[in-house]
Image: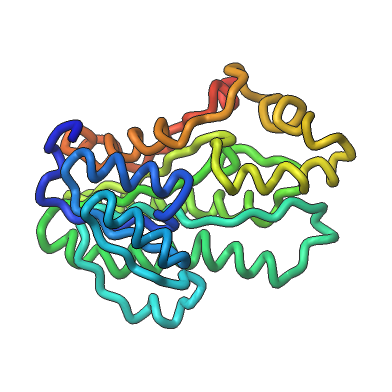
Amino acid sequence: MTDATLTGRKALVTGGASGIGAAAVRALAAHGAHVTIADIDHDAAARLAAEVSGEAWAVDLTDTAALAELSLDVDVLVNNAGIQKVAPIQDVDPADLHRILTLMLESPFLLVRAAVPHMYEQGWGRIINVSSVHGLRASAFKSAYVAAKHGLEGLSKAVALEGAPHGVTSNCVNPSYVRTPLVDKQIADQAATHGIPEDEVVEKIMLTESAIKRLVEPEEVGELIAFLAGPFAGMVTGAAYTMDGGWTAS
């Protein structure tokens, strides 16, 4: 265990069974939190829950009717679940746009709505939204994803203003490309869209804007999330914490 700054706190991480979500789960648990792993992949969530002595919650976060009825007794909410679609806007199926906006904007809204009554009552809470450098900068061929992440930034700031009198913070973390299955799945799509070989995608597309020429590691994002969830981040709210190797510095 790293320390015990989150001992006694209950955390919920969506999309928590892999990638950034799993790294966040491990980091929060290492800091003492009891973590619930919300994921559509129940088996993977259950394996990770056993590893960190947490709980697994098999859930389809696109079922917004069910989410609208929720009441969450959690102290830390990490909205992380996401998907990607790489294509020119004229080739994007409207159903894909709807699914991305539902999962990455409407679902976080509903989970925040379900969590804040408990947080307000106790006078303490942490809402951490896993955004992206694409919540601050646009890229071609990612119209749906960029729109969802920009919306998440606005939601996070509005929640920060409402939550401030109640001891509740709300922030975004904004990594560039992270070494995760989601990024791995983009490589073929990026290659096809840009007309380049797959083995050139990381260098010529993913790392072009970054001053530090490597992918972000999931554990780096996980530790930033754990910091924002902890007691030393009480004055950090309404912020977008970039972890992009200098992408947004220019």
Residue sitting at x 36%, y 66%: 111
Q: Position of residue 95 (x, y in %)?
A: 70, 72
Residue in the foreground of this view, choosing between 155 and 246: 246
Whole-percent x, y for residue 161 in the image:
31, 50
* 13 lies above or below 111: above
Tell me which residue sits at (62%, 37%) in the image. 137
In the foreground, 26 or 118: 26
Q: Position of residue 180 (x, y in %)?
A: 54, 42
Based on the displayed image, in which of its 4 quarters is residue 67 positioned?
bottom left
Drawn side of residue 34 relative to residue 200, left or right: left
Q: Is residue 195 above or below residue 44?
A: above
> Is residue 42 among what the camera can see?
yes
**Eyeballing the image, is 246 above or below 55?**
above
Q: Residue at x 79, y 37 (%)?
A: 198
At 44% from the left and 82% from the top, the residue drawn is 65
Tell me the colour scheme of the image: rainbow
Which quarter of the figure is the N terminus placed in? Answer: top left
Q: Quadrant of the C terminus?
A: top right
Query: Total number of numbered labels?
Result: 0
Give the x, y percent position of residue 168: 22, 51
| Residue 165 appears anywhere in the view | no
Left or right: 92 in relation to 181 = right
Dividing the picture into quadrants, the one containing residue 148 is: bottom right
